[in-house]
Image: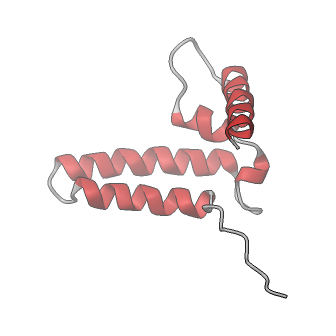
Amino acid sequence: MQHLAAQFSDRAMARIRQSRQGDGPASPRDIIGAIPAEGVPAGLDPDLEAISLMTMSAGLGTSVLGGHSSPGQAQAVIDYHLNRLFPPSRPAAITRT
């Protein structure tokens, strides 16, 4: 599993370097956009999802700084949307014979 995770990471980093614009660090849009289409549920636009996550995180940051939300609430919102885009893998069902 570690070997497969390392391979996936290498491929993702190569895609991020290819798609990145400019010499600065990769933006959230670069990172989300570099994830293969099978990482995003059918019918969703990866570019629009990346923009949505960026704007949502900026708004949540302002909300936390303004005292309208707690850091925990902001993190819960981000986690919710990331889990919607990238559902956690479920353990395989055990079948009994």
Provide residue 34's location: percent of width, then percent of height.
69, 36
**Frontmost residue, 41 versus 94:** 94
Provide residue 24's location: percent of width, then percent of height.
51, 15
**Frontmost residue, 4 versus 35:** 4
Residue extending furthest toward the front:
97
Asked which quadrant contains residue 5, the reply is top right
Is 11 drawn above or below residue 68 in the view shown?
Answer: above
Provide residue 54's location: percent of width, then percent of height.
47, 44
78 displayed left or right of 37: left
Asked which quadrant contains residue 77, the reply is bottom left
5 displayed left or right of 64: right
Rendering colour mode = secondary structure
Residue extending furthest toward the top:
23
Q: Residue at x 26, y 47 (%)?
A: 62
- Quarter placement of the N terminus: top right
Is 77 drawn above or below residue 7 in the view shown?
Answer: below
29 displayed left or right of 2: left
60 displayed left or right of 66: right
Q: Residue at x 73, y 70 (%)?
A: 92
Q: How many marks?
A: 0
Residue extending furthest toward the right:
97
Q: Residue at x 34, y 50 (%)?
A: 59
**Frontmost residue, 72 versus 33:** 72
Is 66 drawn above or below residue 87 in the view shown?
Answer: above
Is 25 drawn above or below residue 59 in the view shown?
Answer: above
Q: Residue at x 65, y 44 (%)?
A: 47
- Quarter placement of the C terminus: bottom right
Residue extending furthest toward the bottom:
97
